Image (spheres, helix red, strand yellow):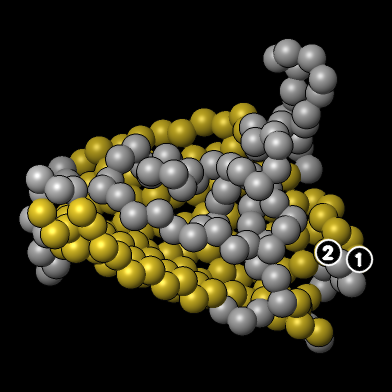
Amino acid sequence: MLVSTRDGRNIRRSLDGARLTLVKGDWTVDLLAARPTLENADYFDNPPNHSSGFWAAYAVHPFKFLLRGNIDLYYMGLDNKNVPFSGKGAGREQRETIGTRLWGTTEHWDYNDEFAFQWGWFGSGDIRAWAVSTEHGYRLDKALSARGSAFEQLPSAAIRIHPATMSAHSTPFTRKALTSATQSCSHGAIWSRCNRRWI
């Protein structure tokens, strides 16, 4: 939801970065720092874009209060030194996001609920946003692999940039409004769950 590969455009976003994975008991924690690359015409000639940076911490742990449940806790940060917004001009943007995801799969049911809050600033204005997404599914028969699901995504109505209001969500490395939906799946690689990738 908050970090995208930019599938809506012809060229996916490329990044240079590093990730450190820590495993302690039932906890798995990933620490990540990355910069998008500048897109040049030749092969292997894309230098990092030092005007933009992204960092994150993402933790996963079993959640005993839910049937076969798990909990993800995350923090993400983004710093763009000069980004334009329609009607607001150009300026420095910094956003930070905290969130949690509750997910699990039983014999017939699967569920995926996510809650996030974002704060930051653009120029001299404050940014505040929140989002809630939920997806629950029921498999009718393993032999048929039939599955029904219900999905709902509710982002906050606006990001407040004082004194005016901006009505579009901005995602890291993308300047367009966010309308993508969360994909349902069992837990896979932490940075590339199903069709939704963190980067």
User: At x 72% / y 58%, what residue is drawn?
Assistant: 176
Using residue 155 as the reference point, say whether residue 167 is left or right of it: right
User: Crowdedness of circle 2 by 10 Å Cα count: few (<14), some, many (20+)?
Assistant: some
Using residue 115 as the reference point, say whether residue 161 is left or right of it: right
Mark 2 → mark 1, Cα distance in angstroms: 6 Å
Residue 34: image location, x then y, percent? 59, 37
Look at label 2 and name its amino acid: Phe
Using residue 56 as the reference point, say whether residue 37 is left or right of it: right
User: Would you place residue 133 above or below residue 173 in this image?
Assistant: below
User: At x 70% / y 14%, what residue is drawn?
Assistant: 44
Q: Nearer the viewer, residue 138 or 40?
A: 138
User: Would you place residue 59 above or below residue 129 in this image?
Assistant: above
User: Would you place residue 31 above or below residue 44 in this image?
Assistant: below
Q: Which residue is outermost to the bottom?
A: 163
Residue 65: image location, x then y, percent? 12, 69
Do tag 2 and tag 1 residues touch (Cβ < 8 Å)?
A: yes
Q: Name the quarter where the C terminus is drawn.
A: top right
Q: Is residue 152 visible?
A: yes
Labelled disc at residue 89: 1
Using residue 129 as the reference point, say whether residue 145 is left or right of it: left
Residue 66: image location, x then y, percent? 14, 67
The residue singled out by tag 2 in the image is 85
User: At x 42% / y 65%, what residue is drawn?
Assistant: 99
Look at label 1 and name its amino acid: Gly
User: At x 86% / y 67%, what residue is drawn?
Assistant: 86
The quadrant holding residue 125 is bottom right
